[in-house]
Image: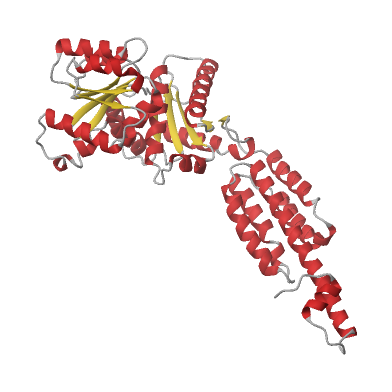
Amino acid sequence: MLNVMIVEDEMLVRLGFKNTVPWEKYGMTVCADAANGREAWELYEGGLRPDLIVTDLLMPEMDGLELIRRIREQDSRTRIVILSCMEDFHLVRQAMNMGVSNYMLKLTMTPEEIDSVLTQVREELGVQESIEASKGIIRNPEYLKENVLKNFVFYNLYSEEEFKRHIAKLKLRLHPERLVVCTLEIDRFDGVREKFKDEKGELIRATILNVLSEQLDQSKRGEAVSDGERRYLLLFSFRDIVSEAKIHEELVWLLQQIQKVMKRFFNVSATIGVSGIRSEYASMRALYRESEEAARRRFYAGTGHILFRRRTEPEDCAEVSRRLNGVLGGLPDALRAVRDDMEEIVRGFSAAGGDCGEADVRKLFVRLLHAPAAQAEAGRQEAAMLAAAYGETLGRCETLDETIDAFGRYLAELAAMRGSRKQLSKEIARAVQYVQEHHAENMSIQQLAEELELSPII
């Protein structure tokens, strides 16, 4: 496989190019990316020798021209492709005189143009090996890291000694002293998927992982792996800090920076659940469960918070009951029977004394939705259909606030539906009475409708 380094100061361009190009099609893999020429040069001086460098020209600290000049002083084999804007074209001409293979315009490049340029580069390097022959060989260190961490934390596939060897081999920033695990969940993920138009979620996952890795690289602490399309694990160790208060302070600052970057680049909020602090790698499984438990507090706390582990308290149950009774109290007298049934369900929930976890509260709302349909009266089918529709709506709610609001809308629609049905019943009764009183007369449907001020159905 050919190694590629991407050098670009605009994070979205860098990550987008890294994650959207089908590099394996050209027998290539991205081995590194840098935010400016100086970072790229330091990687190069440190021994990294990519086969292809894709670089911007205008960057802080060291521009692309200087980077190309330094590389060409030592190396004529490495291929270089420029990412540029139309207004930088005078710089492109200078770069082309320094042995650059080709250039691409950032704002207008198409998949066909990218294909043409990368095919040219592959041919220049004289690659004859079959790309198919390399399939199945895992070379990406990020992929290896994710597998090692997941296999240990989730599946207990390694002994602690085996895990230590993997950590050392992959040079992960993870020591057994004072470990913390965080669960990061993307709030309202369906909107993110729609924005990216990424049904499988692979582009989103890879892009978010790259953003998280960049933040952790800057802090020189922690590792990030995905745990599904909307959830990510952040694993930290604080070997250098003894004070738990200091650990808490640094951790909160770092997590807040991550939240800011997520908002800035993706316009999404992230809720982060934080575990306690323990030592020894074997404790990471328990720490993961703690972070999950903390993240579930989002249902009560709302989105976009950093949440520390705390058991669900009795006041959570009281809050659910109080808010539901407030909503039910607004139902009209015409729905008194429905209201009484629902209030009885809420009282039963309060008396049960459960832990009021999210799953229990969601089950409560499902029972409330279907209570009207359980009544043996006209309109039962319509109520069941309305409950089914709002069941899906409530399933997408992520917090108690959102769930209460959606339930309030359901009750309003239910009241409107029952009101229109009662109105219809009155009008039908008037029509029947009128026909009985005037049955001897020759009267059309149109005349009957006009007499009763109704709209005829034709």
Along the horizontal axis of the image, is 221 left or right of 109? right
Along the horizontal axis of the image, is 272 left or right of 101? right
Along the horizontal axis of the image, is 105 left or right of 407? left
Visible in this render: residue 11?
yes
Question: Toward the viewer: 75 or 366?
Answer: 75
Question: Toward the viewer: 205 or 289?
Answer: 205
Question: Toward the viewer: 212 or 198?
Answer: 198
Residue at image position (17%, 31%) is 120
Q: Quadrant of the C terminus?
A: bottom right
* Horizontal and vertical percent position of residue 320: 70, 44
What residue occupies the far bottom of the structure in this picture? 440
Above or below, 398 relative to 376: above
* Horizontal and vertical percent position of residue 1: 17, 32
Above or below, 7 relative to 372: above
Question: Toward the viewer: 446 or 52?
Answer: 446
* Horizontal and vertical percent position of residue 99: 17, 18
* Horizontal and vertical percent position of residue 104: 28, 27
Visible in this render: residue 223?
no
What is the number of callouts on the image? Answer: 0
How is the rendered protein coloured? Answer: secondary structure
Above or below, 41 relative to 132: above
Residue at image position (34%, 31%) is 108
Residue at image position (37%, 35%) is 206
Residue at image position (26%, 34%) is 113
